[in-house]
Image (cartoon, coloured by chain):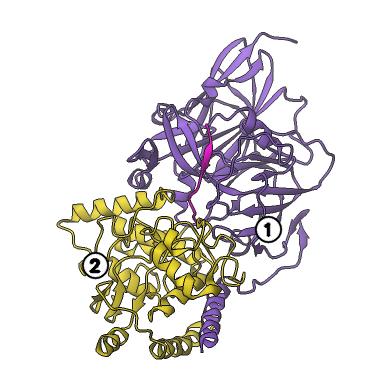
Amino acid sequence: MNILTNIAPVKITLTILTVMMLSLSSVADAQVLVSSGSFHSVMPEVKGEPVEVDSFYLDKTAVTNKQYSKFLQDHENWQPGNVPSIFAYKGYLKSWENTNSDEVVNPDQPVTNVSWYAANAYCQSVGGRLPTLNEWEYSAQLMDFDSLDEAREFANSLMSWYSTFDNENIGAVGSTGIENRHGVKDQFGLIMEWVEDFKPVIANDLSLDCGTVGRMQKLGNAYSYAASIRYITRMSFSPKSTNSTVGFRCAYDVETIEDQKASL
Amino acid sequence: MKSIKLTFTLIIGLLLTGITSLSYAQTDEYEMDGKTFGMPEAEVFTEDYDGPPVVGDHLSLLPNLEPLDYKGNKTHEVRIDIIAQEIEVADGVKYEAWTFGGTVPGPVLHVREGDRITFTMKNRSDEEVTITEPTKEGSPFMQQVAQNNYMKAEEATMPMPHSMDFHAGTVAKDDKWRTIAPGQSIKFDWVANYAGSYIYHCGTPSVLMHTAMGQHGVVVVSPKEGYDTEYEVDKEYVIVQSEYYLKKGSGDLYQYDYEAAQNRNPSHVVFNGHQTILHDQPLKANAGDRVRFHVSNNGPSGTSSFHVIGGIFDRVWLEGHPFNEMRGMQTVLLGASSSATIDMIVPEEGKYILIDHEFADAEKGATGTLKAGPREK
């Protein structure tokens, strides 16, 4: 099972390609720098050591229906009906009445019902990529709380959210009021989000059984409990999965953005 | 260039898929002690199916048990889809439940020891499914829900990964009990090797959350030769005890209370999924009847000290297995996912209260009524 070693060269190639194919999309304030650091993962294979994460840029908000609609205009092969079944289940963009940019329904809401393949294609089209699992989780945990009680309360509300997702009334991006210390918004409380390696190799060993949550409870608090629900839910997806609660945002290598800025 | 990138993405995607679909070591079918082991590998696939969520001749709504109208053994084609439903679990208490087939607990499956079950399940949690319109297809369960929608079920969606763990099945969980994403289906065989009443539940972590959200039910496996009695019973009912952990949400609906579930402090402990259903619709019998209860405690975390006020259990088969016979019991202690088949003589006309004699549970709802009419024989 050498999947990791198989993936690594592919990833490097992808990164090179991404840089080579960089489009000159505007670098406004849509992305923020998440500076390097470390965090504690709930993944059982990480033995208490913090996970180091390099600096990267991340979209402040999830990709909206409006943004995705524009992507479809330029990439007809991703329009519903044109997408081969190996890239998405039938529910792909099922809530969309039409794909005309002028008449996008709920333009400021995050796009959902997109497969991992579609999310990848979108991020590549804007010169980015999906954040890695560790990047996403690291950013999500850069929250500042005034007290342990406040953190606990927040974690409890996360658990409620994971069990009572109101997918019929998803708000606009930026509407949750939840923000990390760099200004990345809505990593919780709006939708679930695709990450590049949503199903890490350990997923197979875990086999997602009753003990999994316990094994992930190393930090012994509600926050890690909520995190374990998130990891497990993601791990269960197929890259073709199209859920009404799953969307995405893009990440960018630091060099990519700096090159982009330099060329402007 | 673009097509190269697409190919790379596809390869990574296929690798990600591949991680869960590595081939499973498959044991060929064999017999031991008259039981059948070694089922074919489960199949995970996608299908366009949008029919009734519960299909099969021997599936019913609690407290009913469909009679086994066939001789010997057979293969059952059974479908129980996963759907979200807004349901009422006590007066004025509604929440969006995660369910097997649309109710909590899910449908009761009745088979005979030695029967084979070809089971199909689609994860339709991201799809609105109506369970209350009468349909000729499906199962007795579908008709019974249409006639008696006591949970006031309404369509809802709540996409989550789920799985099925039949305690009545003897298989490798990493194959048959695999978690499937919304939109996926799974199909596998199992043989009901042991007689008794067995729970089924979702085994996807957090199991506490998934079962507390409503994903559990019961399979009744009747013994090949029946129970060793010199009589036939007059009435047969299925009773499931379970807990809810709910708190008021922001709107009218209630929602999962994570802390209460962790601390084993249920908001409701109920029979057959609803706090008052067995009082609103009492079980019926007559004085002098022999009543058989298949009682299962589905938890997720509590015990049940099952008692009937005014009765003594004439015979009790622990876990419902004919070998485990006890006589003259006042109370049967059931751990989480434990069951008993209980025969009781209804002494005289009047009311009998089914109760979890752990009174904290009783006062949270774990009671019901058996209403006995006059003696007919």
Q: Which mark is drawn over residue B187?
A: 1
Residue A228 figure quarter = bottom left
Q: Please give the chain letter of the residue carrying mark 1.
A: B
Q: Provide residue B209's location: percent of width, then percent of height.
A: 44, 49
Q: Which mark is drawn over residue A142?
A: 2
**Mark 2: few/some/many CA within 10 Å (<14, 14-19, 20+):** some
Q: Quadrant of the C terminus of chain B?
A: top right
- Range shown magenta: B152-160
Q: Provide residue A150's location: percent of width, then percent of height.
A: 20, 53
Q: Is residue B336 magenta?
A: no
- State whether residue A120 is above or below residue A231: below
Residue at 41% from the left image edge and 71% from the top image edge:
A195
- State whether residue A240 is above or below residue B260: below
Q: Which chain is purple?
A: B
- State whether residue B20 is above or below residue B307: below
Residue at 38% from the left image edge and 72% from the top image edge:
A133
B320 displayed left or right of B229: left
Q: Which chain is yellow?
A: A
Q: Which mark is drawn over residue A188?
A: none
Nearest to the eye among marks 2 and 1: give it. 2
Front residue (pair A80, B77): A80
Question: Tag 2's secondary structure?
Answer: loop
**Mark 1: few/some/many CA within 10 Å (<14, 14-19, 20+):** some
The secondary structure that dominates the magenta segment is loop
